[in-house]
Image (cartoon, rainbow, N blue to C red):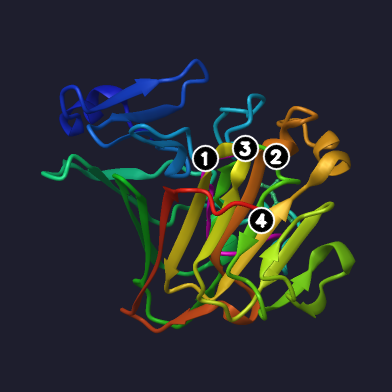
Amino acid sequence: MPQQIDTLRKWEVPGIAKFETGTSGLISLTITAPVASGRIYLQGAHITHFQPRGAAPVLFLSTKSHFSTGKAIRGGIPVIFPWFGAHCGNPTAPAHGFARNREWEIEAVDSLPSGAVTVSMILRPDDASQTQAFGHAFLLRYRVTFGEQLELHLETENTGAANFKFEEALHTYLNVSDVREVRVEGLSGAEYLDKTEGFRQKREKSERLQLTGETDRVYLDTQSECVVDDPAAERTISIAKRGSDTTVVWNPWKDKTAALNDMEADEWLRMLCIETANTGENAVTLEPGQRHVMSAAIGVGPARGR
Ligand code: TA6
């Protein structure tokens, strides 16, 4: 049963955290904290906005994104669970799992002495076919702090009686000035699967990766922090992580963007996905009662120059 906005008012913090219903009917929590502003939707626990005070928005959000029930928002940080990409055994199951399409439940909203705001949301199984495609008992708890950095903690608990394996990703769309001009540091030496070449395995040779075309790479067994250097925007965006062995780098470039009905033709220029994940051979197995936390911290800093 969708949560009604009146029942959510009790979580609001006057002048800092307020629930709103968008024109599409989706409910979001708008954060106007002293140190940062932000927005997170109940659907998918989907963060669509993060802006530290004095900085430009850190996340990309498509101007053509759908905001409709059950359809993933294009941009921000989709929460991917319990499979990444297509479901291996069920072609009718939604790409990237069901967590980003379902309404999550607010568990807490706290305004911190630091001036930051923490939001905690949970997701339990339902009887929809999507959840059945996974077929295991779980509890997801997502704790997000809108502060000088955006801190994300995605906890998965096995609440059932049997082991299960899952994939996960914080599918972060970063706001960049021109994806052709930025450099990505932190992936040098990592093995990756190149999805633009049939998942061919390669090794990253670049200390400062520059994208020159459609890029869809799954870097495996890497725990490194990534830093996106954006001299034109006079900043870097860093993505540090814990509990994650996979980093995905994606930009659809011009032709693939043209095939997306929820992105403007030229929006590929202003976005770059650096995704904190555990996929494929890095998928996580939980025993009954076990928990796993994957964390990311996204922050801005001074540019490093060309
Ligand atoms: O993370 C990269 C990727 O797996 C790409 O292959 C592309 O499919 C992208 O995710 C977006 O997927 P979506 O289902 O959100 O359109």
Q: Report the residue at 24% width, 32% height from top.
A: 33
Q: Report the residue at 80% width, 65% height from top.
A: 195
Q: Assign a secondary structure to mark 2.
A: loop
Q: Which residues are magenta?
A: 74-85
CA gap, disc 1 and disc 2: 14 Å
Q: Report the residue at 67% width, 64% height from top.
A: 208
- The amino acid pointed to by label 1 is Leu
From the image, state whether disc 1 or disc 3 is nearer to you.
1
In this figure, which residue is indicated by the disc labeled 2? 178
Q: Is residue 132 left or right of residue 104?
A: right
In this figure, which residue is indicated by the disc labeled 4? 183
Q: Is residue 15 above or below residue 298?
A: above
Q: Earlier in the sequence, mark 1 or mark 3?
A: 1
Magenta stretch: dominant secondary structure: loop
Q: Assign a secondary structure to mark 3.
A: loop
Q: Is residue 223 above or below residue 156?
A: below
Q: Earlier in the sequence, mark 3 or mark 2?
A: 3
